[in-house]
Image (cartoon, rainbow, N blue to C red):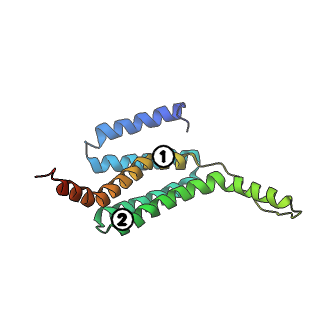
């Protein structure tokens, strides 16, 4: 389903009406509707890649829950880096697998070694890139929070030491 197609216009109209008028401004129902409609929209393009976005969503959801309950800074950093690694791992694999494989084969062909490797005959799942772009502000906010939590005691101490705080 393309953004400039009649299918998308009908789909968007239905989701818009359901979101604003049927869910009765129930935030939980509205969020559930957005998630389900996002999966339908993504699956409309190619249902075989739906498991990727589902897996990424589940990982990020449970990591987000654990982050909200975790008090130890090192464990929070590990959770954040796990989410980043999973999402960028998907993106890197689909975007760069064939590139590195072709260069690896070319590099060994200079030495007379013939390598027969299978490349992936798929294109990058479009939603993966956009989904991970949407997560970027959350990662940056996480890094900002980690910075503030780790630097605040030192800054407070320096301010008190210089006499700027009453």
Disc 1, SS: helix
* 69 relative to 26, above or below: below
Q: Position of residue 73 (x, y in %)?
A: 33, 66
Mark 1 nearby-residue class (10 Å; few <14, some 14–19, many ≥20)? few
Query: In this orientation, which residue lies closer to the viewer: 119 or 16?
Result: 119
| Percent x, y of residue 15 | 39, 39
Tell me if 31 is positioned left or right of 128 in this view.
Answer: left
Q: Which mark is residue 76?
A: 2
Secondary element at image label 2: helix
Can you tell which of label 2 and label 1 is closer to the viewer?
Answer: 2
Does 148 sit left or right of 99 as displayed? left
Q: Which residue is mark 1?
A: 133
Between disc 2 and disc 1, whose residue precedes? 2
Furthest toward the left, the residue is 166
The quarter of the rendered structure image containing the N terminus is: top right
Residue 113's place in the image compared with 129, above or below, is: below
Q: Residue at x 30, y 37 (%)?
A: 20
Give the CA distance from mark 2 to mark 1: 21 Å
Q: Nearer the viewer, residue 143 or 129?
A: 143
Left or right: 35 as drawn, with respect to 118? left
């Amino acid at each position: 389903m393309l953004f400039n197609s009649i299918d998308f216009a009908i789909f968007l109209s239905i989701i818009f009406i359901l979101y604003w008028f049927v869910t009765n401004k129930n935030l939980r129902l509205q969020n559930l509707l957005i998630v389900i409609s996002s999966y339908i929209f993504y699956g409309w393009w190619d249902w075989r890649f739906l498991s990727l976005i589902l897996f990424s969503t589940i990982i990020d959801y449970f990591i987000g829950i654990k982050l909200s309950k975790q008090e130890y800074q090192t464990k929070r950093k590990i959770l954040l880096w796990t989410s980043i690694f999973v999402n960028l791992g998907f993106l890197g694999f689909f975007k760069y697998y064939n590139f590195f494989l072709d260069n690896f084969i070319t590099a060994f062909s200079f030495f007379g070694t013939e390598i027969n490797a299978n490349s992936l005959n798929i294109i990058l799942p479009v939603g993966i890139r956009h989904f991970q772009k949407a997560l970027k502000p959350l990662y940056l906010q996480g890094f900002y929070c980690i910075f503030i939590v780790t630097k605040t005691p030192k800054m407070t101490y320096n301010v008190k030491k210089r006499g700027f705080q009453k």
